[in-house]
Image (tube, grey):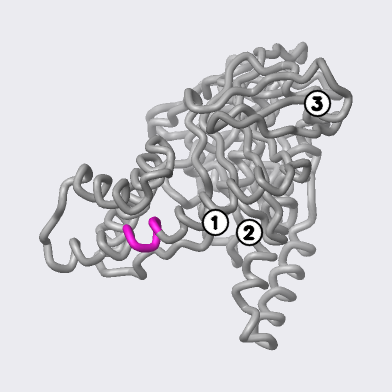
Amino acid sequence: MNFTKSIYINIHMKSIKIKLDQLNQNKSNKLRSILTDLEFIAKDYLSAKKQELETKQYQPFKEHYARYRGLYPDLNSAILQNTLRNMDSLVRSYISLCKRKHKLVAFPVITKIAIPLRNDAYHFEWNDESKSFDAWLKFLRTNFPLKLCKYHIRALQEATSFGDGSIYLDSDETLNLRLVFKTKPKQALGTKTLGIDIGIAKPIVCSDGHMVGSGAFIKHKKLEFGKARAKHQKHKEQITNKQSRWTDDLNHKLSAELIDYCVSNNIGVLALENLKGSHLANRRFRRYTWAFKDLLNKISYKALNAGLKVIGVDPRYTSQTCSSCGQKEKSNRISQSLYVCSACGTRLNADINAARNIYALSGMDGLFVNQAHGALSGNHLL
């Protein structure tokens, strides 16, 4: 068995959300008017693309662009082009999904539209002349004032360059700016390595035995959201959106707690499951779905932003292999929480066993993999 590993590149990209609640009426109306136009364009363009797919009569991009350019002559050309190309990406994703599932799935619909900010079409600038605002967003020949919190100021002071962002309406109809930027690289001082397994009883399980979060709490909240949808059918979309926001927020908190633990415990390298596709290993004991991949992604980028190195390893058989002697046997995984090795008698939490195997596969302590048997060798685990 060939256990592969890869090292994630530390690109140090950050994204922050800034409320545009300091705009005068004219500036606010200008952005809202653009969003209204883009919403109509996006829906109309998607409808046209759906008809093209059904009739197999395709029009080149430039003809679509010229049509909307004529209908909206005052709309910035870069905004229009980027919006149409974003819709093209959505359609390509739809086609790819149909091919993977070997059937037609629901055609995409627009639920939220945003003004795309290409990195060469806007400019961020600190405001040193007035205490009323901290910075300016220069866009469409207009200066939009930005009032920043302490977190935003600290983050933006580390910015070295800006990427593509967006302006969108929140659920409460408030204008928001999503600003994406590259930061100065950090280097963690930790010398230890930690293997991470994404579990059910505990969402995050470390190779040193530390655990983060409660799977029982997650399951309870998912059941509550399900009951609310069943009880309030008219509001099920809003409930689903609320659940999505809750999931995103919880994954942020879980990943942040893990990184804080790493920084305070001299951890310099994280070994994570290297995902290919949407599934994690060990689906046998994952009785309910959770945003596991999103959690791993959040752990990864938070670790990189904190200066930790992140190593991705192939997670296959990590839940079946004994972290002490290296025997690989499916029946050793007695239950979701218990692993008992039939060869050496090792008895421990199954998720900790998997986390130790992930740690060993990182190769950071001289452990090696027996290619003939797919077994893990060595016992110098963290």
Sequence-earlier tag: 3 or 1: 3
* 110 lies above or below 319: below
**Quadrant that contains the N terminus:** top left
Residue at screen point 11% across, 62% down: 56
Q: Mark 3 belongs to which amino acid?
A: Asp
Kindly identify which residue carries mark 1. 331
Is 269 placed left or right of 75 in the picture?
A: right
Q: Mark 1 belongs to which amino acid?
A: Ser
Query: Can you name the residue that lies furthest to the right here?
Result: 131
Q: Do the residues labelled 2 and 1 touch (CB within 8 Å)?
A: yes
Dominant secondary structure, magenta: helix
Could you tell me if residue 324 is visible in this image?
no
User: Is 220 included in the stretch rendered in magenta?
Assistant: no
Residue at screen point 79% across, 45% down: 212
Residue at screen point 60% across, 20% down: 182
How far is mark 3 from mark 1, CA to CA? 61 Å
Q: Which image quarter: residue 291? A: bottom right
Under circle 3, the secondary element is loop
Q: Do the residues labelled 3 and 1 touch (CB within 8 Å)?
A: no
Is 63 placed left or right of 362 in the picture?
A: left
Kindly identify which residue carries mark 3. 134
Magenta residues span 41-45
Rendering coords of residue 183 (x, y %): 65, 18
Kindly identify which residue carries mark 2. 334
How far is mark 2 from mark 3, CA to CA? 58 Å
